[in-house]
Amino acid sequence: MNRIEATYQITTPMFIGDAMQEASGISPASVKGALRFWWRALHWGWVRNGKQDDAGAFKELHVAESQLFGSAADKGVGQGQFLLRVAVEKSQRGKPLNSGTGMQYLAGIGLFHFRDGFTRDSIQSGKFTIHIVLKPSITLVQKKQLLDALKAFGLLGGLGARARRGLGSVSISGLIVDGDRQPVPQDIAEFKSEIARLLEGGAATRPPFSGMSAESRIDISQSGNNAHKLLESAGSEMQLYRSFGRHGKVNGRQSERNFVDDHDDVLRVGEGKRMSSLPKRSVFGLPHNYFFSSSGNFKVDIAPDGNGRGRRASPLMLHVHEFPNGGGAILVQSVLRAKFLPNREPVYFKASRRGSFNLGFKDDQIDWDVLTNYLDRFVDRQTITGVGL
């Protein structure tokens, strides 16, 4: 039969849509892009282990990905080994309801305005099914790899804007392969077992992009019965951990001021001084923006400047997973350590006053313990076995 049907529940508001930024639906291109990401994340170790350097592994990975997913750029490749369509059902759309400051913080200034609220509609809830028809030429290895990508997408991933911050999380609730129904995790124990299986064979060395390796860490940080409350809790904890606060408070809670040096060093940029290294919080991803209302309303933007890059996606990924049949929900947080930026990449510091300057990036400027300490805040966490710490 050579058919696959994978069904997913939308567990947190998904900001995805058309060119007009309206929540018009879920396109096959969006899903295929997400599957490519998880395929690469899972299979870097498959090509890298045993290779002398990243360059040869990159070429091999690119060829394998093109053969499975297709490529318009590579001569003689064309279509991949399968056709894909998406059927969305039971979806509810509109601006997120009853969101607290935690979810607003995770949405960021692109999706949320302090005065106007959420700036775009979302798919608030619902489910969709990915229908896949496999070509007769697909190999058993390719079929297994595609199935693993479908599972990783539905256990750790999401779709749309701010998916790495837990918005647009999707939870796999059904899988049918060639007419036979396959098991999907029904509880925490089965979830942990499936994640450990997926990550077998991860790269022994740190990947050059967001991929699984011996340095990855995946935690079940919290559990509960309400997916939105779990995401709200994660956002509140992240904001309290990262923020300097105003008048000693962060949303009414006592400010921890864990990164006073970041605040003070960037503040000096407004006085015309240069920084010698990146702020510690840069490990959460770039661009990194500061606004100082108490010092004349000036701001500083920090972003990679090499090859027009402009950003570095966060290695910390949030996902809220909802088990089928009312089995509860869990907050999953993954740190996919990778080479943060190419060495000597220029990083641009742009101040609204006193001009701007570039700083040459060095890999030892990144303090990965900042993310480790954040994950350790969750006292009931379960670090999944089989994943490096």
Image: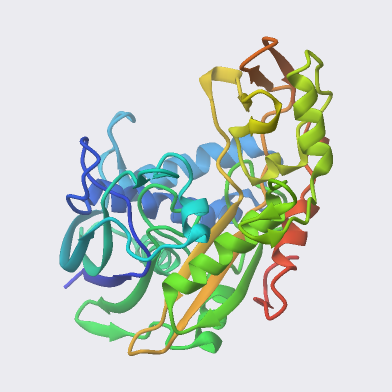
Q: Is residue 202 left or right of residue 121?
A: right
Residue 298 in the image: above or below residue 388: above
Q: Is residue 268 left or right of residue 204?
A: right
* Residue 182: quarter of image: bottom left
Residue 72 in the image: above or below residue 256: above
Q: What residue sits 37% from the left and 42% below the top?
A: 66
Q: Position of residue 127 (x, y in %)?
A: 24, 70
| Camera-nearest residue between 168 and 264 | 264
Q: What residue sits 41% from the left and 89% below the top?
A: 327
Q: Is residue 292 visible?
A: no
Quarter of the image containing the C terminus? bottom right
Q: What residue sits 48% from the left and 88% below the top?
A: 187
Q: Position of residue 136 (x, y in %)?
A: 20, 60
Q: Is residue 89 visible?
A: yes
| Camera-nearest residue between 274 and 144 | 274
Q: Position of residue 340 (x, y in %)?
A: 67, 39
Colour logic: rainbow
Quarter of the image containing the N terminus? bottom left
| Camera-nearest residue between 99 and 302 | 99
Residue 380 in the image: above or below residue 262: below
Q: Position of residue 281 (x, y in %)?
A: 71, 43
Q: How many badges with numbers are in the image?
A: 0
Q: Is residue 262 left or right of residue 113?
A: right
Q: Residue furthest top?
A: 355
| Camera-nearest residue between 115 and 285 | 115
